[in-house]
Image: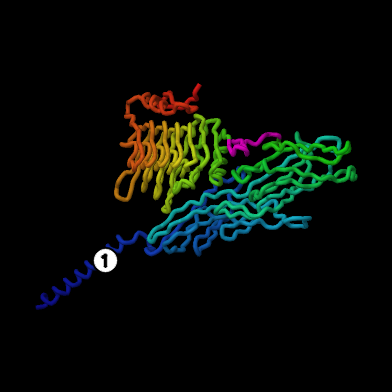
Amino acid sequence: MKPTRYIPILAAAAAAAAALLTASCVKDTLYNTPHPDYGKIAVTADWSARGEGLDIPATWTIAMGDYTGTETSATHAPDHLFTPGSYTLVAWNPAEGITVSGTTATVAPASGNQTTGAFIDNTPGWFFTHTEQVAIEKDKDYPLTAAMKQQVRELTLVVEPTGDAADRITEIVAHLTGVAGTLDFATDTYGAASNVVLPFTKITEGDDAGKWKATVRLLGVTGTEQLLTGEIRYADGNPTPTTLESDLTEALAAFNTGKNASLTLGGTLVETPEEAEFSGFEISGWEPGQGESGAAEDLGYNYDTTTKTYTVYNADGLLAWNEAARKDLSINCTLTADIDLTGKKWTPIGDGSMSKYGYQGTFDGQGHRITGLTITTNSTGGQNATLFDGIGSDGTVKNLQLVNVSYTVQQNGVAGGIANSNYGTITACSVKGDITANSGAVGGIASINNGSIIGCWYNGQLEGHNSTGGTPMGGIACFNDGSVAACYWGGNAGQGVNSNMGGTVEATKVNDGDSWQTAVDGMNAALTGNDYQWKLGANSLPVLQKNQ
């Protein structure tokens, strides 16, 4: 009888053990993290865009939701757990003379007594910021990168006195107006105009002996004008002190872009006689780069304020235009040389969600090449890999060759060779390289085309994915509701346009081993009247040449 009494007990124990094991297995498959109801972040600061010679700040701070933390190493991984929702991640470093409230940085008032106006500190510490939107889901870890942007720029003014009274100058007491005292770094909005003292000192050694120099650090410039205002004083009071005014508005028009490069301006102090008597000096010919060394600072571009055009001849110049165009989408760009962006960080221009948020200017590559453009995104909130996130209905991109591009969207987002969404015109452009979006659509020229793509080609490997297991990709565009005319593609894509939603499509594949000459002839027939057309290059792919 004993055996019969133990059998049900053993069976019950076995059943309980099986139930426990089953429950344990179910729990492991339900949750990916130890915080199933919350999200958790780890933020790594990227300081690579800081100016030459600047040290990485010793500490930096992040704020997101109700959490604020300070870090001294490269990565900040707080124990704090975040309720699912949308957050703004803000990162900055403590800088002397600057306070931060929310996303607004304020420069401290200047020490000492000033005569008139609001004066602020003229040498605040080096200040860097980052903001981005983060969508938190439960049971997820988020590795984030804070690309720290330099927000304080150094300005040096060098002036050379001329004339009989030049050697008698003992002091230049001056200040600069139209300086920003605050900056909302989330929106790049500069506050009301303030003043800074310009601490002019005389250079006594070297080739520039006899010139006067002043160096300040500014959060930016603001308002309608920037004036140098001051007084020149002379030995023994002879002549009597004279006033000095000079308009730097045009010379500082692009000061708020490319802050990681210091700016040096040089001018000449010229005597201003009045009724045959000496009355003082005025400064003429402000030019960039006429520094103490006498060597011109290479900004990589020239800017025409009348036409709002950056004429760009190197990578630094193109990045300066990029920053300016993201603030004013109508600023034009003309390339005068091939540009190598290898190792450079690129932020796509415009917003492809609507035409009005896209780029509205003209980008003319003039047949030049941009090589080595690499973009890798890793954002659950959606971050696209492309040259222009959006080209608006008034925007034009033309005569441009992108070579050896590498776009990778690791999480959410789409990828397009020239643009994410095109509402404008893309003419005589090419893209060569590999484009991947792990959770979105890809297009060799554009992901979505609502405008016109004319005489363009793509060659490379495309890879797109969607939630249903599909592979949305097109050799020219993934989705089209506009016009694709005389375009060609090579590589693995099976279709020139993955989904045509009411537009017109004239796109032809060039299979492996086939000549691109037919493509050259077809594109050139559509580019009649364009300044540039295609010819076969040394690698048997089309290259642009200027019409003779």
- Asked whether the viewer can see residue 147, the reply is yes
Image point 32% across, 26% down: which residue? 513
Q: Quadrant of residue 537?
A: top left
Taken as a whole, is the magenta stretch helix, strand or loop? loop
Residues shaded magenta: 294-310
In this picture, is 139 found above or below 423? Answer: below
Q: Position of residue 157 (x, y in %)?
A: 72, 42
In this picture the colour scheme is: rainbow
Task: Judge from the rendering whether residue 270 lies leftward or rightward of residue 125; answer left or right.
Answer: right
Give, as a three-letter code, the residue at label 1: Ala
Which one is in front, 291 or 302?
302
Q: Percent position (x, y) of residue 492?
A: 33, 35
Q: Residue tagged by mark 1?
A: 23
How busy is the neighbourhood of tag 1: few (under 14 within 10 Å), some, or many (20 plus)?
few
Asked which secondary structure carries label 1, the reply is helix
Q: Nearer the viewer, residue 2 or 296?
A: 296
Magenta region includes residue 21? no
Q: Position of residue 294 (x, y in %)?
A: 71, 34
